[in-house]
Image: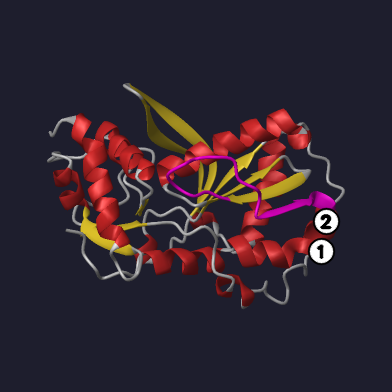
Amino acid sequence: MKSSDLFPEIAQALAADVESASSDSKRLKLRTLLAKFGYEKRSDSNTAEITRVLSEAGLTVNPPLVRYGDSWEISTEDWIYLSIVKGTRESSETKQLSPPRDWNSDGWFDKVAGLLLRTEREVEIKFAVPLLIRLGYTDEDRFDGMPVPASHGSRGSTLVIDHAAFNSQLDALKGQPLLTIEAKRDSYLSKAKQLQKAHDQAKSYCYWTQCEFFLVTDGQIVHVYRVGRGKFGDIEPLFECSRQELKHKFSELFALVSKESLASHYLKKLSSTEEAT
């Protein structure tokens, strides 16, 4: 292993290489990325460390390097894409996407407006999960209670994400979370301090999973954020509404974070054929 003191320099060199790409993205095999940092094999600790230094250099790593639960989603022979996140999504990505014609044929959006949600678990089961289904995510796409190894200095820890949404049908997006979801108990987010705490918690999940979008809800309000890399400062929501407004604003939410919309976004990030040197 190379000295960890050199890791920021290695990451900055990779960032400079990616900045020279015509597509703002370059690819390399996971084994090659590990070798650049002096590792022959991957582990929870070294993938977390590489994720950290690359993020601090302003790079995203897709699909992410970390392990979910008991298994690695990608092999060391798979391609890893390094890219620089732009400040905003191109408007053309969302203009053409709208919900299917029968999106409220079962009346769920009408019924949920007055639904009693007594616990955090009920927020998950009765609100967050049905909403994900209506955004196009199937049971196979959803990893509930997803454990992810993380690193805090010399200490390791495991984060547990309430829900992570994938596109399980596309091999090209294997292991790439499209959206993470943090659910809180009813009305938890009504206080600014608690909203900030939930926001920061969900943002940290995106850091390790290299997922750019997260949704936070307490069953009363829905917030969607996009996270950049590098400086991890406060950000404004891309979308926000109350549960009572959701029926009227669902088309906007669908355009932002539906399975179809986010799959298109990530496929563009993983389309580069330029190789990092």
Q: Which residue is depicted at the point 77% across and 52% down?
A: 241
- Looking at the image, what colour scheme do you see? secondary structure
User: Which residue is most to the right?
Assistant: 114
Amino acid type, mark 1:
His
From the viewer's perspective, tell me whether residue 231 is left or right of residue 50. Answer: right
Q: Please state the horizontal and vertical placement of residue 140, each as a whole percent of the image.
A: 49, 56
Q: Which residue is depicted at the point 77% across and 70% down?
A: 105
Residue holding disc 2:
245
Quadrant that contains the C terminus: bottom left
Residue holding disc 1:
248
Q: Secondary structure at mark 1?
A: helix
Amino acid type, mark 2:
Glu
Q: Where 249 falls versus 177 (above or below)? A: below
Classify residue 78 by image quadrant.
Answer: bottom left
Q: Total number of numbered labels?
A: 2
Q: Give, as a single range, the part of the protein colored magenta.
A: 226-244
From the viewer's perspective, tell me whether residue 95 is left or right of residue 54. Answer: right
Q: Secondary structure at mark 2?
A: helix
User: Which residue is most to the top?
Assistant: 155
242 magenta-colored: yes
Q: Where 205 falls versus 20 (above or below)? A: above
Estimate how packed mark 1 is, as few (under 14), some (14 to 19) or many (20 or more) residues with alpha carbons within 10 Å: few
Q: Please state the horizontal and vertical placement of residue 232, each as a whole percent of the image.
A: 49, 40
Mark 2 near mark 1, Cβ–Cβ under 8 Å?
yes
